[in-house]
Amino acid sequence: MPANTLPSAELVALLERAPITHLLGRRILALDLDAGTLVVEFDGKAEFQNPARQIQGGMLSAMLDDVTAVLVTATLEPGAFCATLSLNTSFLASATTGTLTGKASFERRGKTICNVRGEIWQGDTLIASAVAVCMVRRPG
């Protein structure tokens, strides 16, 4: 798939099937399977705020888990899926309500284990980053 293009309608339907997609307000902006990269937007909703009126860290972690797993899932054959084995997250700045950009890229794409780096940005500020280890599960 050429860089900076959207995935096929079939892939988008698969990736949007999960309720978490709608909760987080994820929209795919760019998927480059050759480069192994994904860019999405999330809605930083008021319901995600902690008492300090910042986006709660658990919601940012959910976004990081989502963007890294979606990248892996986009590369799989029909019927296969991925499960996150670990997600090591670093919180670098606070986020406010509004649009957040998620980015993911492969560090290593193995047959059954993938190492994926994820980032959450708000404007030009890196809010949080994570390294995910994902296991590919195949039918049968």
Image (cartoon, helix red, strand yellow):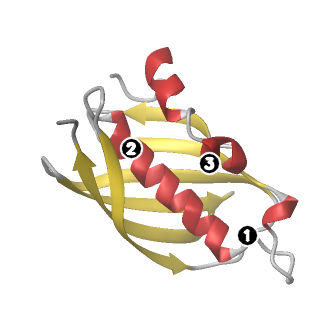
Q: Residues within 10 Å of mark 1 (few under 14, many from 20)?
A: many
Q: Nearer the viewer, mark 2 or mark 1?
A: 2
List the residue tagged with mark 3.
20
Residue 43 in percent (x, y) is at: 74, 50
Which one is earlier in the sequence, the residue at label 2 or at label 1? 2
List the residue tagged with mark 1.
95
Q: Give the image quarter of residue 11.
A: top left
Query: For the residue labelled by badge 3, is the local secondary structure a helix, a strand or a loop?
Result: helix
Amino acid type, callout 1: Ala
- How far apart are the alpha carbons under marks 2 and 1? 23 Å
Residue 87 in percent (x, y) is at: 40, 70
Classify 49 as above or below 121.
Answer: below
Q: Give the image quarter of residue 128.
A: bottom right
Amino acid type, callout 3: Ile
- Name, please, the residue furthest toward the left: 111
Which one is earlier in the sequence, the residue at label 1 or at label 3? 3
List the residue tagged with mark 2.
71
Q: Are marks 1 and 3 in contact (CB under 8 Å)?
A: no
Q: For the point 48% across and 59% down, which residue is it? A: 65
Q: For the point 56% across and 40% down, which residue is it? A: 18
Q: Nearer the viewer, mark 3 or mark 2?
A: 3
